[in-house]
Amino acid sequence: MSRNPGGEPGLWKRLFTLRSRLSRPTEIGLGVLAFVFLLAVWAIVVATSSIKPQYMPSLLSIGEALYSLFVDFNFAADIYISVVRVAIAFAIAAVMAIPIGILMGSYRVFGALGEPVIDLIRYLPVPALVPLTVIWLGIGEGSKIALLWMGTFFQLVLLIADDAKRVPQEYVETAYTLGAKQRHVLGLVILRSILPTMVDNLRITLGWCWSYVILAEIVASNEGIGQVIWASRRFGKTPEVMAGVLTIGLIGLLSDQLIRLASKKLFPYLR
Amino acid sequence: MTQHEASTDDANFLRIDHVSKWFGGADRHAGMQVIDDVSMTIEKGELAVFVGPSGCGKTTLMRIVGGLDQPTSGTVMLGGEAVKGPDRRKGVVFQSYSSFPWLNVLDNVKFGLRFRDGLSAREKDEIARHYVDLVGLVGFESFYVNKISGGMRQRLALARTLAADPDILLMDEPFGALDAQNREFLQVQLLDIRERERKTIVFVTHDVDEAVFLAERVFIFSARPATIIEEIRVSETLPAKRDLKVKDSEQFLHLRNRIQAVIRTQARRTEEEMLRVAARRR
Ligand SMILES: Nc1ncnc2c1ncn2[C@@H]1O[C@H](COP(=O)(O)OP(=O)(O)OP(=O)(O)O)[C@@H](O)[C@H]1O
Ligand SMILES: [Mg+2]
């Protein structure tokens, strides 16, 4: 939609107009441009400086390392394991945090009970919990899932409780005067109203969950992306370390974009 | 039930009995009194308008009638039953836009229908479309709330509330945020809808023209704490069936000037009171 009667302002002008919208292809193009720029800088630095490859390997060697990880070391299985760990822990955390958060944000009694305890636990740094989970649950899958769960659940539950609190009172009262009972208000108004921000919060905490899985795998694991990165480091294989790190980034980018896309489809009324 | 009993029930359809409201405790030092011993009865099918200076307690009284706030003392009876909390019988159109942004126009109107028993999906659809039509939103059924204008949003709120089939309609400055044209248009529409739906309506406004144009009876409230200072039976002066031409009649102008004069003195009182409270705090 054009703001000036003279017609659509030029692309160049729109790029630098506060809050003006860009077309989808332009946005994707800009995203690609940033990647190309990053890669180019990397390539130029590698080619022109005297930094040793073991600190800054060439793009080609990182590509080769990624290829050999998949072909020779069955990297797909490690990715799969990490994804499954994140998926299980995150699903448990979300399934618990959503109803508990909504109750805490909607009934002061649950809020007053839960907030102080959860706030305390939330501030415990997750790495500091690793020894505890190992003491309690050993080094099996249980301790990893527990660690990821702790890192995610307590954050998520408070975010959801805050959102539930912020649902406008008008919506709640309107629902009552239209004949809704408390249980309807919880589901049809409060949950429904916070859904878009909840999806956002899930997206953000999913990112945190990914960093904790790598941590858990570095500390004690025989498989998973984190273990591959750590093992590669021990053998001084910097390209493999880079390839591993890059893989995590790509998985994050992918899941993030998928959730954003789903969000656009699910909540058309936000546009 | 005898004929006589039925008619007194109708005459006392809404009964506000010695209602007072304090916020923050009923004590002159800690709390603040907003409503001071208000009593009135409103007939079934009547359109009563509350006018009064800003901040005097009109919204608070309306919320008490709707069961959204509790009176500190006194009672409210609707159709012979004490008002305890909000429900479908007391429909409310709020001062601010309150339709659900995640639902389109038709689904907003349908929202209250899901709590009504014994309606098939088809009947619900028909009822909802009837009210969409009644408020003139045909063609906009699939629009989300943020894609329609302010005037349309208030019409949507009206349709949504009517579809739930309340016994009484409580409207709190529903047209307050609209421009003059939209406001007059909706006033006429409201009278028209009322004619067809035969609802009891309590309408809150601080627009005196609006009050006189719509009302059968106007209650003028004092500055905070609200008391009724005058009750004017507009229907004794103005015709029952009104169109915008009424606004030019001598009777209309006379009434509006009279009410305006009362409110002006009250508004000044509110400001003086605010200064006194501020001085006492200091
Ligand atoms: N929940 C509350 N707690 C404390 N004070 C309140 C509360 N609700 C309203 N008040 C105060 O009560 C007074 C009356 O408010 P109310 O909203 O009923 O006035 P009003 O007549 O509707 O005003 P307006 O015409 O501006 O809408 C105001 O001074 C307001 O600040
Ligand atoms: Mg008000």
Image (spheres, coloured by chain):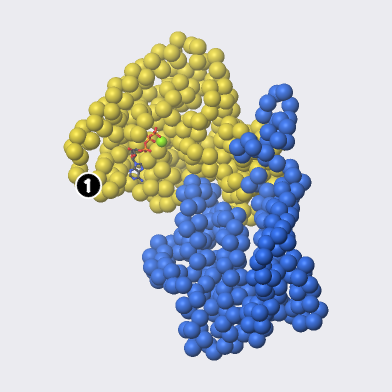
* Quadrant of picture, ligand 2: top left
Horizontal arrangement in the rendering, residue A63 relative to residue A230 (left or right) = right
Q: Is residue B14 left or right of residue A66?
A: left
Q: Residue furthest right?
A: A71
- For this orientation, the residue located farthest to the front is A50
Name the chain letter of the residue that bears numbered label 1: B
Indicate the chain coloured yellow by its letter.
B
Q: What amino acid is labelled 1 in the image?
A: Ala
Q: Point out residue B254 in the picture as x, y percentages from the top left corner.
A: 40, 13
Which residue shows up at 33% across the image and 21% down it? Answer: B264
Q: Colour of chain A?
A: blue
B6, B10: nearer the viewer: B10
The residue drawn where x is 56% and y is 53% is A193
Relative to A95, is A223 on the left or the right? right
Residue B102 shows in this picture:
yes
Please say whether residue B46 is visible from this viewpoint.
Answer: no
**Residue drawn at (38%, 44%), measured in percent from left and top?**
B64
Residue at 20% across / 40% down in the picture? B281
Q: Residues within 10 Å of mark 1 (few under 14, many from 20)?
A: few
